[in-house]
Image (spheres, rainbow, N blue to C red):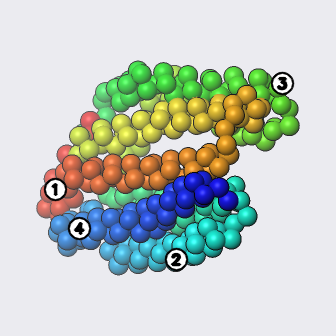
Amino acid sequence: MNSFDSVLIAGTFAAQIFVLAYYLPHRRRQHFESMFTRYPPAEYPRLYPVPRERIAHALVRHWRIQGLIGIAAVFVLVLGFAYASNTLEYARWMLLTLIAQLVPALLGMPWVVRMARAFRAMPPPAVRSAELRAWRVVDFVSPFLIGLGLAASVLAISCAPIAWSLQPRPLNVIVLCAGASLAMLIRMAHVLLGPVTFPRTDPYMTEDDTFRARQRRFNMLFLAAAFMGFYGAFMQLYAAHIVRFDVVYIGIGVSVLVQVIALGTASAQFHDFERRDFSVYRSEGEAKVAR
């Protein structure tokens, strides 16, 4: 293997294992332990729609799966560096391991959905205000980000016929990239042109916290559309041989990007936790409901 590329892949691979299998799970474990300590279920029953024991059991199971995958990933890292026939094969090993490391998050999605449903199913506070304001998307997302998401989606869709005319064989790449951007474009158009409705995260969240939760939801939509659009356009042009780039570096870029997204998402969650007003979840607290 190329010595520089193999060392670069090994370094990226090691960072991927550390971030996804050890650093982030450790930070999340500290986060939940801090939450249980600062806001015990006995004093903040509305913060825990399911018993604490069930939450702790689900978290421990999730962390154990991540740890076991991390141990296996270390063996793949070492064996690949020693025995992979070329850097492309080594990069594939890294990306396959990345997919395996993302499996626990996918397996945890049903639990997240159940928690959200449990929050929404809680009995509402005795006094709650009505949602009177007619909200618009621009109340939550900057016009620049809206334009960026729309432009990137249109760009990816526009690249499809160009890529097909020059290199019709990579049909799967064209359909996947252009189709994903088309779906995002339809979703953004629906949000921009249709009525803006907001299901409550839970009936006790304060006005400011509710606004930030809604803002994050819309920002994520347009950020995801921008990323998928630019990435889809690049992949279509790459498949059509208009853009030349070593596929090994694409694999490295994917791993780095996933790590950055995971770190950024976790950091945003931790920051939001520190800003939240949890007094409304106390057993004797009065909820300040969003307007």
Q: Earlier in the sequence, mark 4 or mark 1?
A: 4
Q: CA distance from mark 1 to mark 2?
A: 41 Å
Question: Residue beneath label 4, please?
Answer: 34
Distance from disc 3 to disc 1, alpha carbons, whole Å, reads 60 Å
The residue that disc 2 covers is 71
Which label sits on residue 279?
1
Quadrant in which the C terminus is drawn: top left
Q: Is residue 33 left or right of residue 262?
A: left
In the visual, does 159 lie left or right of 209? right
Circle nearer the N terminus (3, 1):
3
Q: Are marks 4 and 1 in contact (CB under 8 Å)?
A: no
Hey, what amino acid is under mark 4? Ser
Nearest to the eye among marks 4 and 1: give it: 4
Name the residue tied to disc 3: 165
Circle 2: residue type: Ile
Q: Nearer the viewer, residue 67 or 213?
A: 67
The answer to whether 221 is drawn above or below residue 76 in the figure is above
Above or below residue 121? Residue 41 is below
Residue at image location 29% in from the left, 54% down from the top: 270
Where's residue 167, x and y in %?
83, 31
Circles 2 and 3: CB atoms closer than 8 Å: no
Which of the two marks, 2 or 4, is nearer to us in this view? Answer: 2
Asked if residue 191 shows in the view, the reply is yes
- The N terminus is located in which quarter? bottom right
